[in-house]
Image (spheres, rainbow, N blue to C red):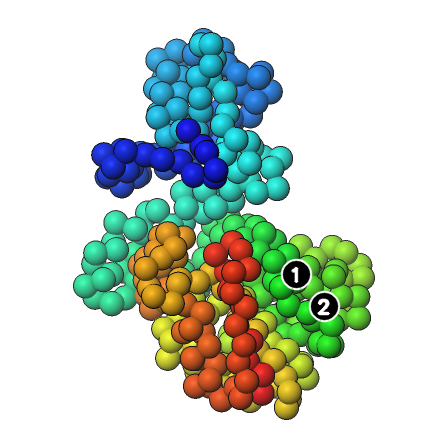
Amino acid sequence: MPTDRHITLPEADYLRILVHGATAFELVRTGLELDLFEHIEAAGGLDVTGAAAALGVAGQPARVLLLGLTSLRLLERHDGRYVNTPLVREKLLRDSPRYLGALIDVQARVINAAMPDLAESVRRDTNVGLRSIDGPGGTLYERLTAHPELQEVFYANMGDASRKSVALLLDGYDFTGVRNVLDLGGGDGANSRALLARYPDLTATLLDHEKVVGIARDRTTDPDVRRRMRFVPGEMFRDPIPTGHDAILICHIFEIWALSRSVELLRRCHAALPEGGACLIYNFVSDDAGTGPMSAGLVSPYFLTLASGEGMAYSAADMADALTEAGFAKVERHDRLGYSHALVVGRK
């Protein structure tokens, strides 16, 4: 039962979740696809017969689904009726601010098909799982340009993650002295839009692949924010880094590449910044000891197996060392921002 934000499991059940993890994921995904959690919440609880009727399925599969989700501690049974746990109400109901639907969707439609290639990716030190998505290029981001529907799914999740994490960045770092920020690899623009909404005198430039820039432009609908936002298609390792900015934001980019490539990118940023300019790396992180947290341990195989074949969730210490190696004179860390993130700032 959820107590103090923890769920305690016997060791044998923990091992069962590891072995049957694909089944556990599909139970959750099916519950979402069939709107089971929504039906249960609206009714204040459902028995097997009521759940079957609400879902439009036979009684036996409804019973299987309810059993599975209850065994995973997502549902509870009270007086013969299944009810949502607080965890479901917080993260699996569509109107919750912390709804995980976008993450589950990208796992189901983009990531999971590649993960059986993890062992071969470890052996060959490359993203073997990329073969699950056809198209041009050697990274997931390039391949997605040939699949607009999957690209929308992918950037819906990235935008959702950005919206959840950017508030912590804005609360943890003062952008008051910044006039022009470059959002490098800015995705769907969620970070830039949040920055511009918080700081009305700030302007932003978003640089990303051409089709991604189109997504960002379409999602930037506020007239004032749109007026202060510039969209530049480009490839950050090949095309010139735009100048004229006193800060460069690298959000959820550092984790994609090997440290040597990230240092190369940071050197290019260093050259594009004026004296006193800042480079801000904001990312999911592992701890400095390399022992966790679980979020870092479970997301890192995605970068190796599918995304690029070379990245992982690095530590804040890795980020700080990379900034120093790239030539930034002063480096500061902002840890414990929440959402398994850290901010590391290098100043030229």
Q: Which mark is residue 158?
A: none
Q: Which mark is residue 171?
A: 1
Image position of 60 with respect to 118: above or below: above
State the image quarter where residue 246 is shown: bottom right
Q: Residues within 10 Å of mark 1 (few under 14, many from 20)?
A: few
Residue type (three-letter) at the residue carrying disc 2: Met
| Secondary structure at numbered mark 2 | strand
Seen from the viewer's position, the closer of residues 130 and 93 is 93
Residue 236, position in %: x, y? 51, 76
Q: Which residue is mark 2?
A: 229
| Secondary structure at numbered mark 1 | helix
Quarter the C terminus occupies: bottom right
Seen from the viewer's position, the closer of residues 302 and 98 is 98
What residue is at 52 percent from the left and 31 percent from the top? 86
Image position of 208 with respect to 301: above or below: below
State the image quarter where residue 214 is shown: bottom right
What residue is at 39 percent from the left and 63 percent from the top? 287
Label whose residue precedes the other's in the sequence (2 or 1): 1
Residue 337, position in %: x, y? 55, 60
